[in-house]
Amino acid sequence: MSLTNLTAAELLALAAAGVAFLTALYLLDRSRRRRMVPSLRFWKACGAVRAARRRRIREPLSLLLQLAAFLLVLLAVAGLRTGDPERVASDHVLLLDASAWMAAAPQGVPLMDEVRRLGLEYVRALPPGDRVMVICADSLAAPLTGFEADRREVEEAVRSCRVGSGAVDVEQLVEAAQRALSLHARRAGEIVFVGSDRTAGAGVHVLPPLSAPLRYLPIEPEPKLRNVGLRRAALRHSLTEGNVWEVFAVVANDGAAAAVVDLSAQFAGEPVAFRRITLDGAQQRSVTFPLRTTAGGELEISLLGEDDFPADNRVSFHVPSRRPARVVVFTRRPGAFRPLLAAGGVVEAEFRPPAAAAPESGEADVLILDHCALPEGWRGGAIAILPPPGSSPVRVARRVSPATITVWNPEHPVSAGLRSRGLRLPSASILEPGDDFVAIAETADGPALVVNDKTRTAVLGFDPVADPVRFDLAAPLLLGNLLRWVRPGVFRQWEMTSAAVGEVVLPLDAGVDPEEIRVVRGDGAPVPFRVVEGVLHFHAGREGTVRVLAGGREIDYSFRAAAIPVARWSPPEGVRRGLPAAPTRKPARVWWPWLALAAAALLLVEWQRFGRGAVRRELPSSEGVERKAA
C-alpha cells in the first residue's frame, strides 16, 4: 500500500485538522428546535428559552459518518494504491516496420509475418493495465490506434498492418513516437521498434539519445537475400537529336552470390532493347541505350527472372510525344539561318523565298520574315527582321548607323539571360511601338526590338545573323528566347526518372522563380512542395506519376515500391532488446474512484438519517397540531 499525491505525514496532518474542525462544529453549533404553539400568546414564553452551548454531542453517529466520509475523500486525494509500488500502468508506442522491404520472402514467408508475430508477442507480454499505441510505418507513419488498454483491439491493429510502398525512416519515426508519449501518455513507457536495421537514406545512421526507453525487436537473423533489382532508371531527351531519348538504368545485386540477369525494354508493346548482365555479389552496373521515337507511349523496363523481392524488378514511364517546332523562314539567305535553327534537333525548319504563299493551317508554328512582309492570311506567331517600312507592324522612325544596345527589358521572357549591354550593331531601325507593343532592346536613340504579347509578334530593327552580330553570344540566345516566347516549351528539357515512394529532393537551376514552379500528379492534382536555398522538396506518399515544371525543365517522376534500402541504422547505447520479462507481481491498483464513491454514499446516508430529510419525517401533521391545540 502506498500514496501517490501525499506523504504519510501530510495525510496525518490534514486528517487531524479535519477531524478537529468537524468535531468543533458539532460541539459549538447552536441547537435549533421547531416549536408548535396554538396561539401567539404563548410565543413569548416559548421564545424566551435561552439556547445553551452543547456539553455533549447529541448525534454521535452523524459525526462518525461525517468523519468517515472526510477521511475517505482525503485518502482519494492522496492517491491510495495497493499492489507493487514500483509497477504502475504505463503507455507504450509499438512501431511496426511495414516498408516495401518487408514484402521479401527469402524462405517463402514474407518478412511482414515475422514483424506481426513479434508485435503480438510483445503486446501479450505486457502487464495488465498498460496501454499501447500501434503505428504501422513505411515512408509515412500511420497510427492504427490511440493509447489503447483493450488488448483485443491492440492485437487486431497489429494483425491489420500491411506492407506499404516506401522505405521507413527510423530516426524520424522514433522522434514522432517520442512526441506522442510526451503529449498524450499518462505515464510514459517505452518505444518499441519491430523490424530490420535498414532505413531510408544512405550510409549508417546512429540514433541520438532518446528521452524515452527504446526497445528493439529485430528480425534475427536477417535472412540470406537473393535479389537483383533496378536501383534506378531514367530517360532524357537528347540535346542533339530531336527523335532520340537517352535511357539509363542501374541494376544492383543485393545478394552475396554472383547472378546473371536479363534486362528487357519495351515501348508501346514492342521490344527496343535487351541486355544480359553479370553481377558479382553486392555489385551494381549501369546500362544505357537509345530510344528513337517522336510518338508517345509506355516504356517498360524489366528484369527477367525470379528472386526474393520482385517489387523492384520493373519500372515504367509514359513517354510524351515529342514533335519539333515547325518554323517556316522566308528569306533569300537560308545558309545564314540554318546553323542556328538546326542546333538541338528541336526545330524543323523550312526555307521559302520571300514572295511565297503563307503556309496552310497546321503546317507551321512560327514564321521568320527576313526583310519581307507578313504573308496574307497568317494569324500565328511571327518574327519580323527589318520588315519593309510600308508593311511593318510598327512605324519605323529612322535608321541610325552605327548603334549600340544599352538596355534590355529585364521583366520580359524574351530578354531572359541577356546581359550584353554593349551589343554593337552596324545599323539599326529605330521603332515607334504602338499601345500593344513593348520595348525589349533599346539604344540611345530609341527601341530596336519590340514585341506584342497578344499576337505573339516580334519586330527586330536590326539583323541578328549579319556580321559581326551573329558572332556575339547574345544573337543565338535572343533567337532561342523569341522561339520559346512564340511557342512555349519548344526548348523544354524533358526528363523522366523512377523514384522510391517518399521524400524527393531536386536541386533547381539558377534563376528559377519559385512562384512559377508547379508540382502536379498524373491526374492534375497539385502536390505541396517547398523551396529551401534553391532546392525543391516534396513528398510522394503513394505510387504513381508526379510532374515537376521548373523554368525550362519538365521532370516526370514515376514512383514505385521502394527498392531494398541500403542505409543502416544502429540504436544508441542502453537500448533494450528482446521481449520484456513477464511481471512477477500484480501492478498497483488505484483506489481513488471507489473511495470517492464510498464517501458520497456515507454523506447520503447521513443526510437521510440526520439532515433535512429526517426533519421532514419528524414534523407532526397539521391535523395533530390542531387537535392538540383544541
Image (spheres, rainbow, N blue to C red):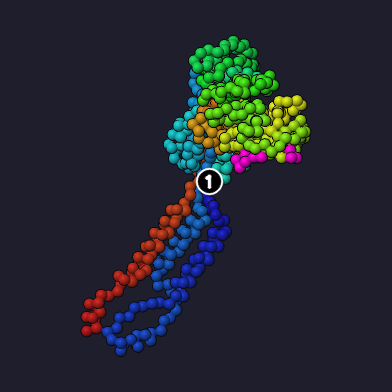
Crowd around label 1: few <14 · some 14–19 · many ≥20 (10 Å): few
- Residue to which mark 1 is pinned: 184
Q: Looking at the image, is 81 positioned above or below residue 459?
A: below
Residue at the outermost bottom position: 41
- In this view of the protein, can residue 218 be seen by the observer? no
- Residue drawn 63% across the image and 27% down it: 372
User: Is 512 or 359 nearer to us in this picture?
Assistant: 359
Check residue 442 for magenta coloring: yes
What's the residue type where badge 1 is placed?
His
Measured from the top left, where is residue 528 in percent x and y? 56, 38
Q: In the rendered view, does 56 fall on the left or right side of 417?
A: left
- Residue drawn 55% across the image and 54% down it: 5
Q: Which residues are magenta?
A: 432-445
User: Is 142 or 422 nearer to us in this picture?
Assistant: 422
- Residue drawn 48% across the image and 37% down it: 144
Q: Report how many numbered discs are placed on residues in the image.
A: 1
User: Is 323 or 190 nearer to us in this picture?
Assistant: 323
Check residue 328 for magenta coloring: no
Measured from the top left, where is residue 604 in percent x and y? 38, 62
Q: Looking at the image, is 505 positioned above or below residue 61?
A: above
Task: Answer with the quarter of the image where residue 415 lies.
Answer: top right
User: Is 400 or 11 nearer to us in this picture?
Assistant: 400
